[in-house]
Amino acid sequence: MSHQSNPRVLIVGAGSMGLVCGYILSEAKAEITFLVRPHRVKDLSPPRRLYCFNDHKLKTFQAYQVATDPEHMIDAQYDFILITLDTHALMNEVGTELVKVIGKAVCGSRTMVVIGSVSFDIRPWFLETSQIPSEQVANGMTLVHAYAPSVVKLPIHEGTDRKLLQEADQGYVDSLGAGFIISDSAPVVAEKFSALYNSSTLSSCAVYPAEKYLLFSASLFPVFPAYELLGWPDYDAIDPEGEIWRVCISAMKEIQRLSIMGVMGEGAAESTSGVGVIQQFSGMAKAMFPFPLVEFYKYHHGGKVVTQDRELMEICVSYGKAEGKQMSALRELLRRTQ
């Protein structure tokens, strides 16, 4: 653990999640270093400018360093390593080698790791691959939605400062209560990371019981292939009794009823309904307006992370099969969106 007055955080990856989390943590007086591939360095020259859809102001983020060699982290004595790669990138051959280097850096130290990759039960794989003690590794997930306006052109709704958005490297919104959630599967990691994140006063981090975290992170994913099949309409235009939506809700219940979800999952399956899920997402879109949530999901879950999403749902299918469950609705969604 660092003996300096300011905590030191290594963020693996510098996409939208990495940059926004880095900015928030820098406002908590953390010293930020990004670990990226060499070709990304030119895109990370400070300052980075972030347009906030909450107050429509441009934030300046310049207090950070950039590293390109994974071996850099060995003996660097970081307080936290936050991984922001998507699950597909983290678990491929290159990502697996990176995880082994992270293990080499963390084992024998007091560095804590937060796996920010959206996943289904990735922690056991990470622990086995890295050989890091379990009490030093927790799952985490940002609920801040962000995108790069120069990379993807999404609709600009009334109320957005068009000029400032066009000047920004990232546009983000933090309107869903907690801006970050972390599992209590490693209680000390959850306590210390949430305390650091919350001290920024810009956003908040909530600690979820491990079962609740897993349920939250996995059970909503059938919404995205169903939404794609419907043509990405406004949520209020979805027919809760339509055939595709009924398959979606059945797929959600199949995931919720996996034994790994426990009693909480059974309760969620009993209460999940087509109308309720529409209301949930419609409420999110209204809370985040003028951030273009519908179009963002089309870009993000319909393209950018579609491989990750499919792999997550395929893992859920395999868990179900191991329990003797057909997972027919989830398999049908995957078949239709191949």
Image (cartoon, grey):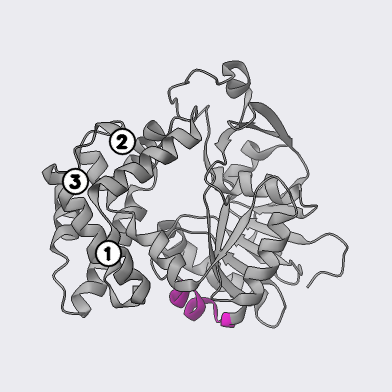
Provide the residue designation for mark 2: 235
Q: What SS does tag 3 mark?
A: helix
Q: Is residue 119 left or right of residue 10?
A: left
**Residue at 69 percent of width and 56 percent of height:** 197
Disc tally is 3
| Residue type, numbered disc 2 | Tyr
Using the image, tell me which numbered label, if any, was put on residue 245.
3
Q: Is residue 80 above or below residue 153?
A: below
Where does the magenta region start and end?
123-134
| Residue type, numbered disc 1 | Ala
User: How far, Cα to Cα, is label 2 from label 1?
Assistant: 21 Å
Q: Is residue 29 above or below residue 145?
A: below
Using the image, tell me which numbered label, if any, was put on residue 269.
1
> Earlier along the polypeptide chain: callout 3 or callout 1?
3
Neighbor class of circle 2 (other Cα within 10 Å; few <14, some 14-19, many 20+) is some
**Residue at 56 percent of width and 81 percent of height:** 134
> Earlier along the polypeptide chain: callout 2 or callout 1?
2
Q: Is residue 80 left or right of residue 172?
A: right
Q: Overall secondary structure of the magenta stretch? A: helix
From this viewpoint, is residue 132 visible? no
Image position, residue 23 (x, y; %): 69, 44
